[in-house]
Image: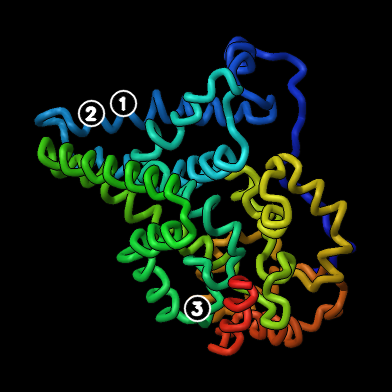
Amino acid sequence: MSANTLLITDPVFEKKKTLNAIDKVALRYIRDERDLPFIYLCLKICFGVIPFAIILFIPGWFNWWIAAPYLVVVGALLNGPYTLMLHNTSHRKFFKKEYDKWNNFIPWALGPFFGQSPETYFAHHIGMHHLENNLPPDLSATVLYQRDSVFGFLHYFFDFFLIGLVRLINYFRQRNKIWFVKWLLAGEFSFFLLCVVTALINFKAALVVFIIPFIIIRFGMMAGNWGQHAFVDPTDAANNYKNSITCINTKYNHACFNDGYHIGHHIRPNRHWTEMAVDFEKNIDKYGENQAVVFQGVDFFMVWFLLMLKNYKSLANKFVDVGNRFDGNQEEIIKFLKSRTKRFSKEQAAIYIQKTAA
């Protein structure tokens, strides 16, 4: 698809003409009116998910007919919106300065119900990933793997799942960022203790409420990051236009606060989520000049899934030719996409490691 025919349908900020009672109360405490949707998501979780979870722990009440829909709601329907709320409030504090302690509510009080151990996401994403920008020594860098390989992804996931925490702690210790280590350990230990204590009370309920969501979210974050950074130009891998992708006009962007605009996010990490679509349209020529990879109608997880199937034809059908370089030639688009999924050689990786060290 040519960029000339694009019509962006992703969310932008529309100021409410009339504020209801919840809006008025919330605006006394939060920093930005544009983040009011986070208030309503928190209310859904507090009055929907958490009571549902408590019911599962009541002796004699646990039933897999109740647990199954709970996992669907938490694992499939609300996991993405919660995680992207956590993402946005990690980059931009949610509550006003005088209520700063309340900013712990989303990661510490709500996070465990979605498998998020408090502080781990913040430490990994803010303290490491954005600084290293998907290049060695980014612990979640994709460039060391063939990005259309199932075995490559499985190695990537299990490396993160089994020893990712140790690697992250070591990363911060080597850089003398002890603050991150302390909070990381506090969050991980607290979550581990929560799982152990609740498992002793009711193992099945603990499995459904905390342990399975933990596995789901860690897999989901790795699959998502794989999709976000699957297409990398080996000759200019530090260029945000060339080491990330953008997914536009998706239901995912409406549910998950424009997360699809990953290039724009890496260019300016604290850009507000309601500004993403506008910024993309404003700077679309830069995307074209830098041969950025843009897809329409698919999200990062579908990109990941299609890569696991090596289904480049479907990816090419969703590809947006922002630079008008291919004139609809699907074979050339596929060739271009394949060139961006190749694993870095040891020599290529060493170049970026040396640049980082310098």
Seen from the viewer's position, the closer of residues 128 and 264 is 128
- The residue sitting at 70% across, 87% down in the picture is 335
Q: Residue 55 carries which label?
A: 2
Asked whether disc 2 touches disc 1, contact meaning CB atoms under 8 Å apart, the reply is yes
- The residue sitting at 13% across, 38% down in the picture is 202
Give how far apart the Cα atoms at labels 2 and 3 are. Answer: 40 Å
Residue 322 in the image: state x and y as whole percent. Answer: 83, 67
Asked whether disc 2 touches disc 3, contact meaning CB atoms under 8 Å apart, the reply is no
> Can residue 294 be seen at all in this image of the molecule?
no
Q: Which mark is residue 51?
A: 1
Q: For mark 3, what is the residue?
A: 309
Which structural element holds mark 1?
A: helix
Which amino acid type corresponds to the residue marked 1 in the rendered image?
Answer: Pro
> Can residue 305 be seen at all in this image of the molecule?
yes
Q: Earlier in the sequence, mark 3 or mark 1?
A: 1
Which amino acid type corresponds to the residue marked 2 in the rendered image?
Answer: Ile
In the figure, 50 relative to 169: above or below? above
Seen from the viewer's position, the closer of residues 54 and 171 is 171
Q: Is residue 350 left or right of 334 when viewed as pictured?
A: left
